[in-house]
Amino acid sequence: MGFALSKLQLNSPAFEFRGKIPRKHTGEGVDISPAFEWSKVPEGTHCFALICHDPDAPLLSTGSYGFVHWVLYNIPGSVTRLPEGTEDYTSGINDARKEGYMGPMPPEGHGIHHYYFWIIAINKEMDLDPGLTLWQLLEQIEPYVIGMNRLVGIYER
């Protein structure tokens, strides 16, 4: 992916940067997505994508590393927050081959896993089909990315 330095900021009322993701938002809890809000949106943003990736997952079977927990896109540029458990916008396919959010649930005893929630600002109107994988999404949006940033949460079983 290209380099898209920006001042875009992503936050969640559920956890702080490098803070523990509440059980409610994990596979051991209710398994609903946390609420998010973002600010310092780059000028010219037409839409957003939000993804969650766990690079600590010991999986290589997907052709890459880690585990993709969430792919969400076609979020209008006027939106700067998502409520907890959102089902709005367009869901992609996570690495469990299901649409929607799949909360953290690392293998027991595997230690702390880091969950990277990325907000990506895009300078073109996009009307992407549902069901894209992370890599399919990135291939389509990469030329139009004008800013991105992440919020990292942790979880351990």
Image (tube, grey):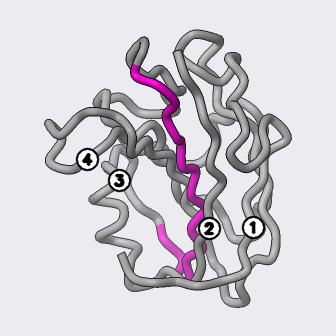
**Label 4 Cα neighbours within 10 Å, binned few <14 / some 14-19 / many ≥20:** some
Residue 90 visible in the snapshot: no
- Which numbered disc flags the more N-terminal residue, 1 or 4? 1
Considering the numbered disc 4 on the image, is that residue within a helix, a strand or a loop? loop
Considering the numbered disc 2 on the image, is that residue within a helix, a strand or a loop? strand
Considering the numbered disc 1 on the image, is that residue within a helix, a strand or a loop? strand
Front residue (pair 15, 56): 56
- Which numbered disc flags the more N-terminal residue, 4 or 2? 4
- Confirm whether the magenta stretch covers residue 121: yes
Residue that extends furthest to the bottom in the rendered view of this protein: 43
Range drawn in magenta: 110-126
- Residue at label 4? 65
Quarter-of-image position of residue 50: bottom right
What distance separates the C-alpha of mark 1 from that of mark 4? 25 Å
Q: Amino acid at mark 2?
A: Asn
Q: Residue at x 39, y 47 (%)?
A: 130
- Residue at label 3? 134
- Residue at label 2? 149
- Confirm whether the magenta stretch covers residue 81: no
Considering the numbered disc 3 on the image, is that residue within a helix, a strand or a loop? helix
Q: Which mark is residue 9?
A: 1
What distance separates the C-alpha of mark 1 from that of mark 2? 6 Å
Vertical comparison of 143 with 19: above or below: below
Quarter-of-image position of residue 22: top right
